[in-house]
Image (tube, rainbow, N blue to C red):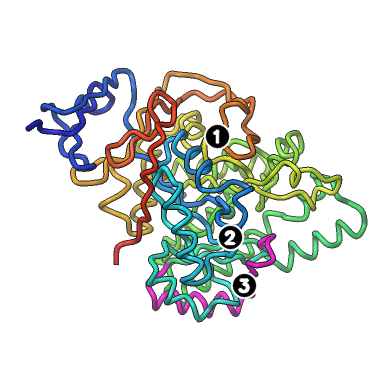
Amino acid sequence: MPDFDLLIRGAQPFENVGIADGKFAAFAAGSAREEVDARGLRLLPGVIDAHVHFNDPGRADWEGFATGSQAAALGGTTTFFDMPLNAHPPTLDRASFDGKRAAAEAQSVVDFALWGGLTPINLDKLEELRDCGVIGLKAFMANSGIDDFPSVPPATLLDGMKRAAKLGLIVAVHAESDEATNRLGAAAQQSGRTTIRDYLNSRPVSAELEAIRMAIEFAGETGCGLHIVHVSCGSGVALIAEARARGINVTCETCPHYLVLTDEDMERIGALAKCAPPLRDIAEQKGLLDHLRAGHITTVGSDHSPAPASMKSDANFFKVWGGISGVQHLLPLLLDLGLDLDLLAQVTAANVAERFRLSPRKGSLAIGADADFVLADLGAVETITADSLQYRHPHSPYVGRRVSGVVQHTFLRGQPVVYNRRLTGSKLGQLIKPNA
Ligand SMILES: [Zn+2]
């Protein structure tokens, strides 16, 4: 009887990694049924991407769990959390949760958790969603862009956060002022100002800060765990870090696009780089990078939000679908930034697992944890091409970009999902629920 099912030999920083029954069994040599020669590669925890929109069921023609999860795996992601919109129906109750779970289990090559929605039309379903095992609740403080997922006015958000606190659920918010973004957006379009720069001007940093302040206020009042998604600016993270220092239960996420692209890139690239909050100027981006390096940003998620090319072109930039296709490059882009590898492992795995109560099963390289990991060639450089994108619609603002740091193999619970940069065809994905 061999000691392990699988032995990974020669990777940094462990000479030997033994895996048995899908879990890390020992960081030492031993006999094994199979061995992988990983000399020259770096072993990193599999990425837990807490923010994707795979739009399945209902809008699988925008992405779907098959191509979405495959792209995730190629980029080193072993668990994703799917947002409650833009699938149809949105995940607002048990029936929609069960429908999405079935669609993901049938197609996903990596593990997944599901977000539930917090909207004015499902406040009586939050307990039901908790019982289903949602990873948390997502609310929009500004227009979501999708009619079947209404935003929450302040009083509703406060009420929802009170309920979520009782249920032990974290609330994630898209933080932009609805009043300010609507007013500025309407004024621009009415006067025919519809360029990329006009769109940028209609979603200022001040609108984001106003919403972040309000959400923090509500977290203090209700005791609800708050996670502010896709913070785009250093000044936003500063508010959150200051609140956390005061004892408020608040964490935040940023996305690779805010770290590597600016407002000028949005003007240059156009629709493929449209997102909300929008890309910011170089000073806010520098602030964001400083806060990331200082450990003030809890998680980095891709906010992968794809759409067909037909929705990405309109003379009026306000009418173009907002959302960046990026799940395949979360890890390569962070590796390319040259982040400290321990910090990288925290913001892409350990912190996510801790914040969303998946520890100790997920998110760490520890004995007994699920053997979800990546073997990456940190010295390899490649140019991202449209051909290499696994998305249903192979476009991305990162096409043409050179990155150093290439994912060679991705393993889920000790099984190869990507081997030598190719998908193995394993459909192993399981629903992961937070610890009680
Ligand atoms: Zn999103």
Position of residue 48 relative to residue 242, above or below, is above
Position of residue 333 relative to residue 281, above or below, is above
The quadrant of the picture occupied by the N terminus is top left
The dot on residue 390 is 1
Residue at x 64% of width, y 64% of height: 210
How far apart marks 3 and 2 lie (CA) works out to: 14 Å
Residue at x 41% of width, y 69% of height: 169
Position of residue 86 relative to residue 331, above or below, is below
The dot on residue 85 is 2
Residue that numbered label 3 is attached to: 152
Pick the residue in front: 212 or 393.
Answer: 393
Give the percent coordinates (x, y) of residue 315. 86, 45
Name the residue at the left extreme: 1
Residue at x 73% of width, y 35% of height: 269
Q: Residues within 10 Å of mark 3 (few under 14, many from 20)?
A: many
Give the percent coordinates (x, y) of residue 311. 74, 47
Q: Which residues are magenta?
A: 144-169
Q: Are marks 1 and 3 in contact (CB under 8 Å)?
A: no
